[in-house]
Amino acid sequence: MISARSLLLVFFVCTAYNLVNGQSGGPPTTLPLARAGEPTLHGIPSVSFDPPGLFLTWEDDPARSMVIDWHTHHTQTTPNIEYRRRNQGEWTAVSKQSLRFPHSDHWVHRVRLQGLRPATIYEFRWGAGSAVYHFQTMPEQADGEPVRVVFGGDTMHRRSMMDAMNRVAAATNPDFIVWGGDFAYADGRPDRAHFWVDWFSSIKETLITPDRRVIPIVLTIGNHEIQKGRDAGSVNYEATDAYRAEVAPYFFGLFAFPGQPGYGALEFGDYLTLLLLDSAHANPVDGAQTQWLRERLSTASGTRHVIPVYHVSAYPSFYSYSGRIATAIRRHWVPLFEQHEVRLVFEHDDHTYKRTFPVRRGIVDFDGIVYMGGGAWGVDTRKPDPPERRWFLVESNDLHHCIVADIDRDSINLRVLDLNGDVMDRLSIPPYDDNMHTAVKQIFPLAYPVGNGFWYSDWFGLFNTSRLPWIHHDEHGWLFVRGRAEQVIWFHDPGNGFGWFWTNPGIYPNLFRMRHRDWVRLDPESGQLVRGLWFFGLSDNVGWLANPHPEPEF
């Protein structure tokens, strides 16, 4: 039985707690209930807190800082955060900033931790008895284990879809995640605040590791963060902070980074700079943003890897190549990327998966830039054009995916994972001088170099790659080559009037000529072409053999 003295003691403890943690004009400070199974004092629930929303990101140096956001319902208490190095010393309390969750009765609370140690685990809580989580600051140098980053975009049409891909990403144990626009699909509408509540709930339930490490997330804006008809291309657009906050209330009201005006950069020591850009949503592509990009690329010249991330694709697999925003990005940003030797770009919006050849100055160039992404994290996907229909594509499909990048000082190794966690594509971005070797291996993985730019393939013979994507073949002469790991290889033969022809290791020396819609065979003894597909014992009009793949653009 509880004594009167015990009840009086609990009353004074609870009253003191509310007086310490309350804020005039802020959210309510009613005492929360303990969760089932938590310890109690004389049968009375202990003070406990675990927020329904929790989001970590950075505004500046990721090696020495962290921004922690947590959310509360209007009926929940709002205690301050305490933090310390994991299992070391006393807890340090930090005052919070409390902000209204736009168009909602929820609250967003924020602390900015500064002066942290690089590559160090910190734990945080909301007072004794609350849930305890932890995070790890980033290293200043990439001299040890590679930094692991998961990239993606277009995150939630339905909660179940986002949850599933979140779990795949979390299972890779990334240091952090980068999402390139279109998150909760609320379109800035006041009646869709609950979309964002559900989005944050997904993160809380699926992007915290079993040992309670919170995975930081970095964002850049997409078209579904903006009210329809009020983006940077609209006639009534205003380039002011007030206008941007009005038309994208959740993006600017819920996240510390990138903040106004809607784009920014994060520098990870001397090994990585992320450029988070706005592809004509709250800001035009040209003008102030392009000037900012020019300046940031100049200051990032000492960084080993510079990776731009934005939403609308300059090299799309579904939308039109000549679209307004895609064209603007290629006109204003891509020349700057090329000038400063950017190697890898992430772009989304198509609801597909795509990867391009290295591209430079509007052609395939193996000293160029690979554009990856497509935006199919947790949304209904679309059927992209196949690579044969768009000159810049190596891979395209309609599968949900996330892209896992292991980044060290010299290279970036990428794996693309589907919803089952299976690898559906791989790519390595090597040191700059190794580009040619890697480019050849992407098309002819079993070929080997024999010196002076010459390579030998057991099935294709001797060829020179000094002017890749043009090769000089020992028997065919000059050929323009496009291919995917020897599965489907297209060649363009301008000298013999072939145009495009197709082959692979399983059918060579048989060749399918697109212009003539026929099969021919290179006779190894005479070096002459023999008509017909006698290798298969079939006529050239049977099924897929008559036209195995659509003709690519050239």
Image (cartoon, rainbow, N blue to C red):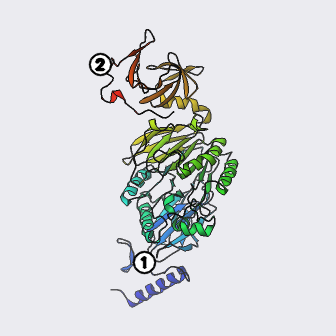
Determine whether 481 is above or below 101 in the image.
above
Q: Circle 1 is placed at which residue position? A: 32
Disc 2 crowd rating (10 Å Cα; few below 14, some 14-19, many 20+) is few
**Is residue 407 or residue 257 the one in the foreground?**
257
Q: Where is residue 83 drawn, in percent x and y?
A: 55, 66
User: Would you identify the image quadrant in which residue 472 lies?
Assistant: top right
Q: Where is residue 522 drawn, in percent x and y?
A: 42, 16
The kind of residue tagged 1 is Pro
Query: Of tags 2 and 1, which is closer to the observer?
Result: 2
Element at label 2? loop
Q: Residue at x 40, y 87 (%)?
A: 7
Q: Residue at x 63, y 48 (%)?
A: 332
**Is residue 419 or residue 127 the one in the foreground?**
419
The kind of residue tagged 2 is Gly
Element at label 1? loop
Q: Where is residue 224 drawn, in percent x and y?
A: 48, 60
Q: Can residue 116 be seen here?
A: yes
Furthest-bottom residue in this view: 4
